[in-house]
Image: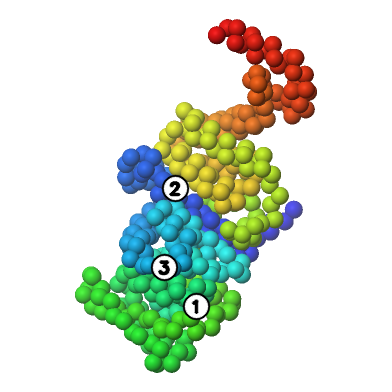
Amino acid sequence: MAMINPTPLACSLSRARGFLAGLIFINSLPKIAGQDFNANIRLFQNTKQWTVLQHVHRQLEETRLRLVDVKRTIDLECPDKILASFNNPTSFYEAAISSFHNTLLGLPPTTMGGVVALCAMSHATSCYLYSTGIQVAFDPFSDFDLWRSTISNDEHQQAFDDLMMAACQEPYLTTLMNPFPVFQNEINLPGEDLNLLWSPDPITNTLIPFLITHNAGETQAPDLQTLQGSPIVANLTHFLEQCGELPLILCGRDATADMCYFIGAPNSSTESGDEQDLKHLYIQLLRERGPLHSPVTQGIISIVERFVDLGYLQSVDEVPDYMLLIGKEILPSNKTFLELCKSAWATLAEAKRRLHNIPCGKCGKVFTRPGNMKRHMERKARCAPLIRNTLGKL
């Protein structure tokens, strides 16, 4: 059977998912290990690519903290739940990647938090590309007016400018301004509607132009094709391509569910409540297992936990498959990987047994089938003696 090459869209979605996995892992490891991630990165394969993710993670964290500081000063009549979630680093990464993912599939974000997260992540990755000598052929700042107009709440459009000024303080734009002398005309706005603010660059002490548009509520929302081809999306796509194979490995390749559905919206999965309970019980047992208490393994479980909640791992059988795929990349030794293999499947079997065990609410006897439990409850005489025998021993 001939191999089917993935489409560019599928590759971008896979890389975005893998990038998110890397950010979740890097963010969780210091908390679990109680030490700097730098001490562990040399143990991994693809060390150079892990270093890139580590560098961008640090820059994103600085950006997130600035956003958190500014959002405390913004008094909104209608709070934005996604923006409020930025106190949690993982929620910030997920908001940005979800906005990117959904935009590629035709549903760009309409909340302030979703738009801010996407623009901030694109800006941070653009700064990284430029710092490594990779020419960035577009200026995200000229794109902010475009994305502001996708926000459905007029009050939130006004707050968008304050948030983006806080998020984007890196000085690389001073070098990029000359190739774009006419970006003002490209957005087709009258001169009186433009307010060109100047933000000081803390490194060079020069001034960076920051474009802000008044009367944002009167701006017509851009069409989907314009958003998908915008610098915000193109820059982030280009960065993910520069990350090499690592994001494709971390996305799980064929171990995870179909990516062509909107994150945060109902998908076509017919997953039952029992399946959801089984996945969460499985993750809980993985957390408790002695052989899996190493910081790196717990970091892998952190990825799995978030991917289950996001719907990336829809079947419980996908969870160990995914764990082993990324474990082979991340774990520092074959011995640790073998321990993960044994524990992953043994723990899944135990979770299935526990979920199917139904204790009697009266006597505590355990049944593996609902029918057996029903017959037991119908024969109260069998249950009552067990209670009397138990009480007699007290």
Q: Which residue is under mark 3?
A: 76
Q: Residues within 10 Å of mark 2 (few under 14, many from 20)?
A: many
* Between 178 and 285, the one nearer to me in the picture: 285
Q: Secondary structure at mark 3?
A: loop
Q: Nearer the viewer, mark 1 or mark 2?
A: 1
Which of the 4 image quarters holds residue 317?
A: top right
In this rendering, the answer to whether 9 lies above or below 245 is below
Of mark 1 and mark 2, the one earlier in the sequence is: 2
* Between 33 and 272, the one nearer to me in the picture: 272
Residue displayed at 57% across by 61% down: 13
In this rendering, the answer to whether 260 lies above or below 347 is below
- Report whether residue 84 is seen: yes
Q: Are marks 3 and 1 in contact (CB under 8 Å)?
A: no
| Residue at mark 1 to residue at mark 2: CA–CA distance | 34 Å
193 relative position to 342: left or right: left
Residue displayed at 65% across by 10% down: 388
Q: Which residue is under mark 2?
A: 25
Image coordinates of residue 18 in percent, x first then y, are 52, 54
- Where residue 149 is drawn, which disc sits there? 1
* Between 375 and 247, the one nearer to me in the picture: 375
| Residue type of the residue flagged with mark 2 | Phe
